[in-house]
Image: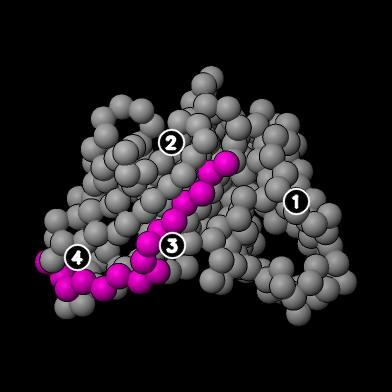
Amino acid sequence: ETGVTQTPRHLVMGMTNKKSLKCEQHLGHNAMYWYKQSAKKPLELMFVYSLEERVENNSVPSRFSPECPNSSHLFLHLHTLQPEDSALYLCASSQVLAGDRNEQFFGPGTRLTVL
Amino acid sequence: AQSVTQLDSHVSVSEGTPVLLRCNYSSSYSPSLFWYVQHPNKGLQLLLKYTSAATLVKGINGFEAEFKKSETSFHLTKPSAHMSDAAEYFCVVTPRTGGFKTIFGAGTRLFVKA
């Protein structure tokens, strides 16, 4: 569809578990993003990677750890989460040209439930 | 600093009538502005974008938006609503150059009545 895939689509985990979310983009973009979408709150930008370097980190708790091994893949490693971390986690990618910030293409999201 | 305010959390229209979803923004630098739509259990899809060219922007599915700098607004319109337009709509602002800060509005849920 949009060229951005996310796995798994649904995840239930306990507070002591460690899990990872995966995002892959097939669009040849050079920037990737993680967002959190909670009920009744605006989408929150969590992390941004441009050319595989982290360029934005919005005061996200350390229990969320991103990894960008190459320009096509982005991971979000989760450990010792809290129930309030339950949300839809969206991945996006964009092609960042010099002096311009193009539109972002979003994946379908991973619905995370923390018990 | 940037912010986005979507003035209505819910809008309800009848099928075939016009749609108006309101968005005001503030930005300390020249903004790029976007409207995205999210259908239930789906990711976000870009409807249209304003970067720096024409102030009246046409998007997909008959939607358009007008950038009004003097009013700091970027309202989304459609002449005739269709049942398939029922979804949540997000207004988004980013700096046009420099930085990756992306600010989403809280969203407007559009209901379309038959």
Secondary element type, mark 3 = loop
Residue B32's tag is 2
Left or right relative to B94: residue B10: left
User: Which corner quadrant of the image does residue A31 belong to?
Assistant: top right
Q: Name the subunit of mark 4.
A: B
Q: Name the subunit of mark 3.
A: B
The location of residue B94, given as percent across then percent down, is: 50, 39
Secondary element type, mark 4 = loop
Secondary element type, mark 1 = loop
Quadrant that contains the C terminus of chain B: bottom left
The location of residue B67, given as percent across then percent down, is: 30, 40
Which of the pair B68/A44 is nearer the observer? B68
Name the residue tied to disc 4: B82
Q: Are marks 1 and 2 in contact (CB under 8 Å)?
A: no
For label 2, count other residues whose C-alpha is less than 10 Å away and answer few (under 14), some (14-19) or many (20+). Answer: many
Say which amino acid is labelled 3: Gly
For label 1, count other residues whose C-alpha is less than 10 Å away and answer few (under 14), some (14-19) or many (20+). Answer: few
Which of the pair A72/B83 is nearer the observer? B83
Image height check: is A68 above or below B54? below
In front of the other: label 1 or label 4? Answer: 1
Q: Are marks 2 and 3 in contact (CB under 8 Å)?
A: no
**How far is the residue under mark 2 from the one under mark 4?**
28 Å
Q: Name the subunit of mark 2.
A: B
Name the residue tied to disc 3: B107
3 or 4: tag closer to the N-terminus:
4
**How far is the residue under mark 2 from the one under mark 3?**
18 Å
**How far is the residue under mark 1 from the one under mark 2?**
24 Å
Say which amino acid is labelled 4: His
Secondary element type, mark 2 = strand
**How far is the residue under mark 1 from the one under mark 3?**
23 Å
